[in-house]
Amino acid sequence: MLSRTANALTWMARYVERAEAAARLADVNLALSLDMDQGGQQGRAWDAVVATTGDLEAFKERYQDSTRESALRFLVLDAENPNSVANCVRNARENTRTVRERLPGEAWELINSLYLRLGPAESAQAGHLEELLEAVKATASQLSGVLAASLLRDEGWHFVQLGRFLERADQTTRLVDVQHALLEHDDAADPGHELRWEAVLKSASGLTMYRRRHGVTDGRRVAQFLLLDAGFPRSAAFCLNAADAALRGLVGTPEGHFINPAEKSLGKLAAQLRYTELEDVLRDGIHLWLDRLQLELIAVGERIEAVYFEPGAGPAPDPTFEQPQQQ
């Protein structure tokens, strides 16, 4: 497979996942703001929502006041925000267009239809955002189903899985980082406390599954569930295990072995989370622990790019000549 094709498939999956995460974040917090009287805390709450995407500084430069309307427009429709839902869908469509022959026809139709629906929305009023956000979430779910049912299990499938789960791990860690910092010192007796933690779980589409695991909502259990629960498909631990399996699947590297720097760094990071407990996270502080994890995710992405995507990098080493090393 050409490196540019692998790159396009990976980033198609990443942009779709990023668009869905932003749409879910906006939708959940829009509902929360309507359920709760935030009063003078509205600006602080929406700053935390925008900070989850890593774009708070850019938001402050473009908008004078942190309000529900300004935050939603920035997150969903703003053409100058590279991580807005509209821009992520546009980038996903462009990557999909270049590799249409590698994908089921329905995949292109889904992404292109969503792009056409979002196009005119850049001048729409925020009152119609709920419908757009539902369309983004529905399209992401439909696309996942189409690819699972129809895409050949070859290199293309592995690159799509790799992109999806790396992006999902990144989005989950950002969500826990910012929201936990906002909420960990709140009074549990506050009637809004449980609503806020439920919003964190809903943003990861995990409230019902969390209830099955733990029942009562509290910050420590939410953090453990979203970061370390290997049975929840949006937890950081699950995503890194799935990304590791996808990367090794490209050349058939056995579990616990590696043949290039990308496999080594991702496998090591996935193994680290498998043997991490919440007490280990709390000992260092969640914010510091997540900062390190996010830096390691960036390093993994750079090594994958160097091995598979950069022109002249050449093919991955032939596993025939490997000297297996147990991680």
Image: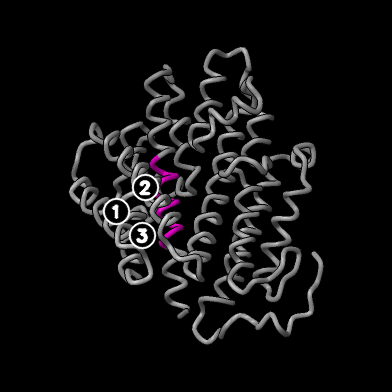
Residue placed under numbered mark 2 in the picture: 142
User: SS class of the residue under badge 1?
Assistant: helix
Side (left or right) of 198 relative to 287: left
Number of numbered discs overlaid on the protein picture: 3
Question: Which callout, 1 or 3, points at the residue further toward the start of the chain?
Answer: 3
| Place of residue 130 in the rendered image (x, y in percent of width and height, measured from the top left) | 29, 33
Residue 13 drawn above or below residue 321? above
Residue farthest to the right, as pictured: 326
Task: Assess disc 3: are there few (<14), some (14-19) or many (≥20) residues with their C-alpha within 10 Å of its C-alpha.
Answer: many
Dividing the picture into quarters, in which one does residue 149 lie?
bottom left
Q: Main secondary structure of the magenta part?
A: helix
Question: Which callout, 1 or 2, points at the residue further toward the start of the chain?
Answer: 1
Task: Assess disc 2: are there few (<14), some (14-19) or many (≥20) residues with their C-alpha within 10 Å of its C-alpha.
Answer: some
What residue sits 59% from the left and 45% below the top?
A: 173
| Place of residue 15 in the rendered image (x, y in percent of width and height, measured from the top left) | 41, 56
Residue placed under numbered mark 3 in the picture: 92
What residue sits 33% from the left and 58% below the top?
A: 107
Task: Tell me the magenta residue range.
Answer: 12-23
| Place of residue 37 in the rendered image (x, y in percent of width and height, measured from the top left) | 42, 16
- Residue type at tag 3: Ala
Residue placed under numbered mark 1 in the picture: 110
Question: Do the residues bearing badges 1 and 2 touch, measured as CB atoms within 8 Å?
Answer: yes
- Residue type at tag 1: Leu
Residue 167 drawn above or below residue 218? below
Dividing the picture into quarters, in which one does residue 253 lie?
bottom right
Task: Assess disc 1: are there few (<14), some (14-19) or many (≥20) residues with their C-alpha within 10 Å of its C-alpha.
Answer: some
Specify how the rendered protein is coloured: one colour
